[in-house]
Amino acid sequence: MKQIRSSILFWVLVVLLPLNIYIIFDYAPVEKTMGIVQKVFYFHVASAWIGLLAFVVVFVSSIWYLWRRHHRINNVALASAEIGTIFISCTLLTGPLWAYPIWNTWWTWDPRLTTTLVLWFMYVAYIALQGGGATESRKRLAAVYGIIAFINVPLVFFSARWWRSIHPIVVSEEGIGLAPKMRIAMFVSLATFSLLYAYLLHLRVKTLELQERIKMLRAEAGR
Amino acid sequence: MPNYWRKVFLVYHKDIRDEFRTFDNLLATLIFGAMLVFIFSFAFQLVELQSQQAFPAVLWVSVFFSSMLAIQRSFAKEKDNGSLDALLLATGDRGIIFLAKFLCNFTVLVVFELVVVPLLWMFIGVNTVGSFDIALFIASLVLGSWGLAAIGTMLNGITIQVPSARLLFPILMFPLLIPLLIGVILCSHAALVGDRASVLGWLYALLAFDLLFTLVPLVLFDYVLEG
């Protein structure tokens, strides 16, 4: 059953990923003032969203792990952190590509930029803490760090916002400041990236489990 | 409850005595701090940067980096001497150990600042024209050291348990310190120019941050020092 579900996800992605590219580059109109550069927005926002989502998954599964101590849950946390790091890296790389022509600077200490960078550092620290050979104590300590780091995210955001802000606010209380076709492109992007995240998470958790199994079998054979 | 605080005091007392008797760790921290402020102020002088503007930034970066040395020993010495289990048995509550170690680290940081702040002040040649707000400056030092000690103690408890992770201590710690960094630098800067009104909110925010990162480890420390 699980096998079928993951292969359905795979084929859905095979269709969705090219479709997403088509919608972004052909269906959605070219922005009037920014031009073609604005297309990076769809990747940028979707990756940032996955970065945050992955971090929430790390937080929830860290609490769950400390509570129940299922190794599987820790694997989910680690896999999610790894995938999150990659997507956050995409956000951090696509941001300057857009910012340089539009803001005339590669980087600025805006709350969202600062928070994203700090998030990236915390992800990397979390993965380093879990290390290659994850022992029981490493998993436990990483879970504690995963919880503290998550608490830190809003603190970084609000303290940096209090200090200054110039990042464009696309989604505000008044609604979404986007043309309808662009809005559709953004939502398709968000959905595609979310499914991609789910699929990658599934694959990575499976790999981690197989790794553990190999280690166990090796230990048994050695004895 | 009085028993709880008595235990905290006893562990704190033990650690402080150890810190001042062995002295080598404190000395290394002090010299490292002095070296940092020397190098920073010297580097600024070389290209004639307005180093007075940079005073709060240099001060806190130096304190943050030196705190790595100051704090890294607090659990490492228990681990190396094999006394962590004894400590756990003697206190029976991991919160007590956290609080005592936190207070000890806080004390060490205050001692460190008593030496390094005047040094940096001298090197940079800070020129305050009567508007220096000393109460605010001390408040920023206390709130900054508090948060630093709390987060540092917590993460030191984490990193000593994984042999190869001791080097991770600063990597784990610095991202968590960013909100603190923003707050203390703004407050110290405001103290220098005597503009207390503009940072009152920050003082409360720092206080809240410190309380949060003292209480959260108290809850989570049972999981850190397990088994």
Image (spheres, coloured by chain):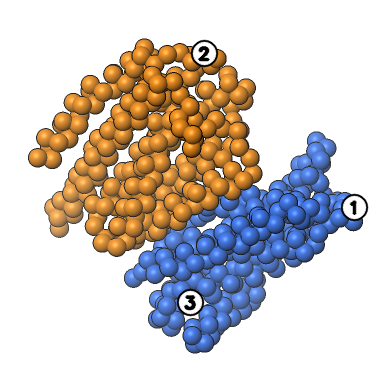
Chain colours: A orange, B blue
Residue farthest toward the right in the current orientation of the protein:
B129
The image quadrant that residue B72 belongs to is bottom right
Under circle 3, the secondary element is: helix
| Mark 3 lies on residue | B96
Q: Where is residue A38 in the image (x, y as percent from the top left)?
A: 48, 19
Asked if labels 1 and 2 share a chain, the reply is no
- Give how far apart the Cα atoms at labels 2 and 3 are: 62 Å
In the picture, the quarter occupied by the C terminus of chain B is bottom left
Crowdedness near tag 2: few (<14), some (14–19) or many (≥20) residues, C-alpha within 10 Å: few
Query: Mark 1 or 3 closer to N-term?
Result: 3
Residue farthest toward the bottom in the current orientation of the protein:
B3
Amino acid type of the residue tagged 3 in the rendering: Ile
A126, B216: nearer the viewer: B216
Disc on res. A91: none
B94, A182: nearer the viewer: A182
**Residue ID at (21%, 47%):** A209
Asked if labels 1 and 3 share a chain, the reply is yes
Image mark 1: chain: B
**Residue ID at (76%, 42%):** B43
| Mark 1 lies on residue | B129
- Between circles 2 and 3, the one closer to the viewer is 2
- Give how far apart the Cα atoms at labels 1 and 2 are: 53 Å
Under circle 2, the secondary element is: loop
Crowdedness near tag 1: few (<14), some (14–19) or many (≥20) residues, C-alpha within 10 Å: few
Badge 2 vs badge 3, beta-carbon distance below 8 Å: no
A173, B124: nearer the viewer: A173
**Residue ID at (12%, 37%):** A3
Asked if labels 2 and 3 share a chain, the reply is no
Q: Position of residue B4 (x, y in %)?
A: 49, 83
Left or right, residue B2 beside residue B124: left
- Give how far apart the Cα atoms at labels 1 and 3 are: 45 Å
| Mark 2 lies on residue | A32
